[in-house]
Image (spheres, rainbow, N blue to C red):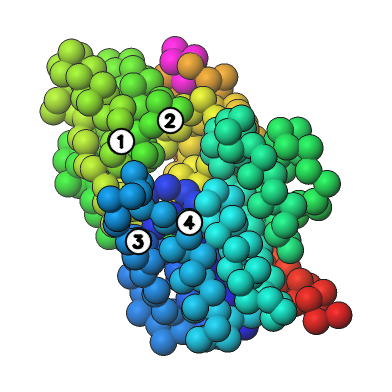
Amino acid sequence: MRIGITCYPTYGGSGIVATELGKELAARGHEIHFITYAPPLRLRAESPNIHFHEVETASYPLFNHPPYTLSLATMMADVATAHKLDLLHCHYAIPHSVSAFLAKSMLEPRRLPVVTTLHGTDITLVGADRSYLPITRFSIEKSDAVTAVSQYLRNATYRTFGVKKEIDVIYNFVNCERCGSERGKRLRDHFAPNGERILIHLSNFRPVKRPVDVVEIFNIVQSQLPAVLLMVGDGPERSNAEHLVSRYALGSKAHFLGKRDDIEELTACAHLLLLPSDNESFGLAALEAMASAVPVLVSNVGGLPEVVTDGVDGHLVEPRNVEEMARRAVEILSDEARRIRMGERAREKARTRFSSSAIIPQYEELYRRILSDASA
C-alpha cells in the first residue's frame, strides 16, 4: 500500500506514534509518505520506502497567520496524485483531518480514503472548545475510518461530540526489540555513580503533566533513600520545576536534560518512571518504560488503567496525591527484588499486548477494510 501520514512532527505522543507507525509499515514493505511542515523527530531510520514532503506556507501581509490548513490540503492532494497514494492517515483531528477532507474533495471523482487517529488533546482540550467543536465533529464524521488510542478516549469522543461514526480502538505500541538496551543500562553509572536509584520523568512539561509534582515527589523520596532525578523534555512548566529544585537545594540530584533523541537509552537506565499527570489518553511514556522493564508510578486517570495494572507492573495513584505517590516510590525502590519482578511483568505486558507486532497488523487490516469499501 501507498500511505500518506500527517502528524505534528515535534515532541508529543501523537507525532511519536505516527512516526513509529510509518517506520513499522515501511519495514513491512508499504510505501510511506510523511506530509508535514518538518521532518518528524524520530524519523531517523533510513528506508527506501519512506519519503518526506515538506509543507510550506506562504506569508502575505493580508494574512495574520499563515494558512497552514490550506497549504497542507494542497500538498496532500499533490502527493496523492504524484505518488498514487491509496489513502491518507491523519494523526490528530485538527487541522489534519480537515485538510484531508479538502484534499479528497479536490481530487473527486477519484476516491482517496482518510483514516483519522484521535490521540487525546485533540478531543479532550482542543476539540471540546466550543469554537472547535463543530469542525472537529465534522472531520470525524467525514473520515472513512476513525481510531482512538484507548477505550477511555473512544468513550470521551462519543460523550463530547455525540458522533455516530464507529470508532475502533487501536492501542499505542512499542517496539520491544529496541527497548532495554545495554547502553541504557550503562548510563546508570554516569547519572548514579554511587548506586543511587534513578527516577525519570518524560513529557512536554505542560501543566497537565504536573512536572512540579514530580519534583515534590522526588524531594520526599531522596530524603529517605539515595536517588537522582532525570527530567527529560521541555515546555512551559520547566522553569517552575527548576525553581522548585533550587528552592529544595536539589541541584546536584535533579538533572534537566531537555529534548533528547536517546529516549530509549535514558528510559532503560532508570529504576522507576514518574507520570503524575492530571490526564492521559494513553500514556506512551509509561508504555516505553514498561517495555524496558522499568516499573511505572502513574496517575489513575484516563487511559492509564488500560496500560498499567496496579500492584503488578506499577502503581496507579489518584492525581495530585504527592505524598501517596512518594510513599509508593519509596516502597518500590526499597525492595529491589520486588522492583525487578514488577519490571519483568511490565515488559511481558508490553511484549504481549502492546508490541508493534501485535498492533501494526490491526492498522493494516483497517486499511484493507476501507480500501475494500472504497472500491465497492
CA–CA distance in space, label 4 to label 1: 25 Å
Which quadrant of the rendered structure holds the C terminus? Answer: bottom right
Q: Earlier in the sequence, mark 2 or mark 3?
A: 3
Q: Which mark is residue 57?
A: 3
Secondary structure state at the residue bearing disc 4 = helix
- Residue 194, given in percent of the width and then of the height, sits at 18, 36
List the residue tagged with mark 1: 235
List the residue tagged with mark 2: 209
On screen, residue 139 versus residue 235, left or right, reads right
Q: Earlier in the sequence, mark 4 or mark 1?
A: 4
- Residue 338, given in percent of the width and then of the height, sits at 50, 35
CA–CA distance in space, label 1 to label 3: 25 Å
Magenta stretch secondary structure, dominant: helix
Q: Earlier in the sequence, mark 1 or mark 2?
A: 2
Q: Which residues are magenta?
A: 321-325
Q: Inspect this view and state whether residue 316 appears.
A: no
Q: Earlier in the sequence, mark 2 or mark 4?
A: 4
CA–CA distance in space, label 2 to label 3: 31 Å
Viewer-nearest of discs 2 and 4: 4
List the residue tagged with mark 4: 69
Secondary structure state at the residue bearing disc 1 = loop
Q: Mark 1 touching mark 3, by CB under 8 A?
A: no
Q: Amino acid at mark 2?
A: Lys
On screen, residue 114 versus residue 187, left or right, reads right
